[in-house]
Amino acid sequence: MTKNHLIHETSPYLLQHADNPVHWYAWNDEALKKAKDENKPIFLSIGYSACHWCHVMAHESFENDDIAKFMNENFVNIKVDREERPDIDDIYQKVCQIATGQGGWPLSIFLTPDQKPFYVGTYFPILDSYGRSGFGSILRQLAQAWKEKPKDIEKASENFLDALKKTETLKTPTKLEKSLLDEAAMNLLQMGDSSYGGFGGAPKFPNAANVSFLFRYAKLSGLSKFNEFALKTLKKMAKGGIFDQIGGGFHRYSTDAKWLVPHFEKMLYDNALIPINYVEAYQITKDPFYLEILRKTLDFVARDMTSSEGGFYSAYDADSEGDEGKFYVWSKSEIKSILGNDAELFSLYYDVTDGGNWEGHNILCNNINLSTVAFNFGISEDIVKEKLSECSKKLLTARSKRTLPGLDDKILISWNALMITAFAKGYRVTGDVTYLNISKNCISFLEKNLFVEGKLLRTFKNGNAKISGYLDDYAYFVNALLDVFEINPDPKYLQLAIHLGNYLIDHFWDEDNSSFFMTSDTHESLIIRPKSNYDLSLPSGNSVSCFVMLRLFHLSNEQKFLKISTKIMESQAQMAAENPFGFGFLLNTIYMYLQKPLEITILNNVNMEIINYLFNSFLPESIMVSINNSKQYEALSDYTFFTGKIFDSNSTNVFVCKDFTCSLPLQTVDEIKKTLE
């Protein structure tokens, strides 16, 4: 079988298309020059390896010899992995939203040789259907228009370009005050589903940052309804099919409002962002249920998504053996054959029936309490728990013998950084040192392989790191370094965080528009220099940069960090109040700024009662550094955060500072409680 140009790539998504009859190129100088030299339009297809509809379109159209022949004759065909090139994806997703009102993957864009879009869509079926043109018809119409109506195409491309440029304009600064958070919280709660939690109807995404904001607003306002809604959301998610009940970890989103039927991909970023909600839920409620979901999720990533070198893989596909979800669903007869006498108990708890709850199969979910199962079988709740645990292990072993969904094993620095944060926060509430070690190992791996000549590279695969880092790579990694530094304050983490923070300002900052560009000033030029402002499935690079600049200011006392952070908040605060769904992470940063961060220093963490109290308290406005020994303290004493405090080798001293005023050394939990109150 003839291979195309993608055979030389490392992206698993691009390699999936290396034996298509389409003469695919990656996005590179060779492909762009070919389009100009031959005056051919570009067909740009953007997707990712775990994308179900990307696979469908590939099978229908890109593996079709007749379609491929026409594409090869009339277009220069370029494939992009949106996870490797978020800048290209961002630009053309915005074009798709301008044109159609929505975006998504696969993204299908037709460009002039100078990269200007003139026709855009997402998935196109191969044949005309339901009044929609099929991909074959679209190709023929656009190839003909390119030859016969060049002025129409030029006009369409210029209109798109004008609209694109307007999306990057300056926002009027807004005064930062509590009323913005009041407005945002009320608007967000109105979008909530009071029956099943979450926001909106189907499909329903986890939206981790929004849940975190509701927790913060509940603390700020003293109104319990915000906590109650956020906790309901987390309970419903954890009991639904979106959570892998026996293997741990969350699928990408729910196709229904009840969280029952997921889109079965498992993305690293979801399994990094969602656990933080469960950490916070546990800190607020002390309910071990949330701790259990946290552990199951982190253990899944440690077991199934971690490379031998310490980096984290990107995603698992939804499909195995050509069927979506096949790896995860069960028949009742199969469960009976594996579990024997315990099958009925397990089936009652996890809603397993002969007819199934999805397309004749069973997605494991939980709609009844342990007490109901215990009553039904005349045994104690502890015995039910024990049996469910044993059954889950048996089913997990049986499932591991099935054909695994495809694994996207590239390592992205931004998503890895999110996962470092999740393991670090998981360590705080579990005390499981394995989680902290996983975080530290991943930082070491990223430093060794993706930090080159003072700069970050984005992606790593087969020993090869490439592509200059984007805004989110820098911002997420600085955040991760600070999260590990707070627990394990090795000065090198803070020094690297400050270095990368300065690099961000020097190479990404747009002074005229009070925000960061997605790409550095040394990056390849595209039709616009894009920006990322919205917190959706992932927090935006600008929101996380804003947060880390605020943290860096408090740790280093360098005023420029505070100035940058404030400018971002002021430029976007009004939009965040009006449209909180798209600004959850930024709202959390505004909350921290308005509350004035608590600077908590724990010197000599020998008193575990104090450590456990502070680590298990919900203090989202805090910067809390726990110093283990006098050597660490001496190495940090030049930073104003730590000056003027006394290290006692015999006892634990806690200092709480706020608004440039510090407490006396606190040595008991009661003293700390009073000071925090």
Image (cartoon, rainbow, N blue to C red):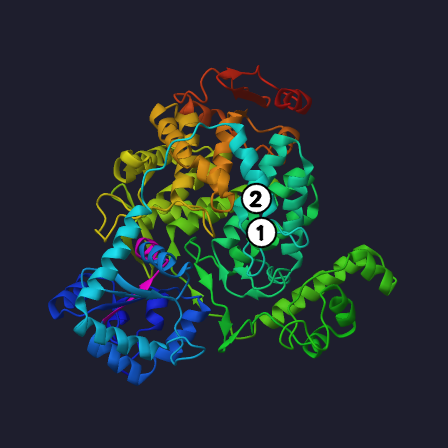
Q: Please, which residue is most extreme toward the left here?
A: 37
Q: Are the two marked residues, 2 and 1, in contact with CB atoms closer than 8 angstroms?
A: yes
Give above or below for 616 relative to 403. above
Looking at the image, residue 476 sits to the left or right of residue 272; the answer is left
The one nearer the camera, 40 or 603, is: 40
Q: Is 81 part of what is drawn in magenta?
A: yes
The residue beneath circle 2 is 188
Residue 501 on image: x %, y % = 34, 35
- Residue situated in front as seen by the camera: 579 or 384: 579
- Left/right placement of residue 494 relative to residue 164 reads right
User: Mark 1 or mark 2, which is nearer the start of the sequence?
Assistant: 2
Q: Is residue 207 above or below residue 252?
A: above
Task: State the image coordinates of residue 35 (x, y, percent, origin top left).
Answer: 17, 67
Q: Residues within 10 Å of mark 2 (few under 14, many from 20)?
A: many
Mark 2 falls on what kind of element?
helix
The three-letter amino acid code for the residue at tag 1 is Phe
Q: Quadrant of residue 99?
A: bottom left
* Position of the N terminus by quadrant: bottom left
Q: Which residue is rendered at x = 57% and y = 39% of the image?
A: 185
Percent across and percent down for residue 106 are 39, 66
Q: In terms of secondary structure, where does tag 1 sit? A: loop
Q: Is residue 198 visible?
A: yes
Name which quarter of the figure residue 669 lies in: top right
Front residue of 230/440: it is 230
Q: Which residues are magenta?
A: 76-90
- Residue 236, image x, y percentages: 66, 54
Residue at 58%, 32% in the rendered image? 619
Residue type pointed to by label 2:
Leu
Asked if residue 306 is among those painted magenta in the image, a careful observer would answer no
Residue with the mark numbered 1 = 199
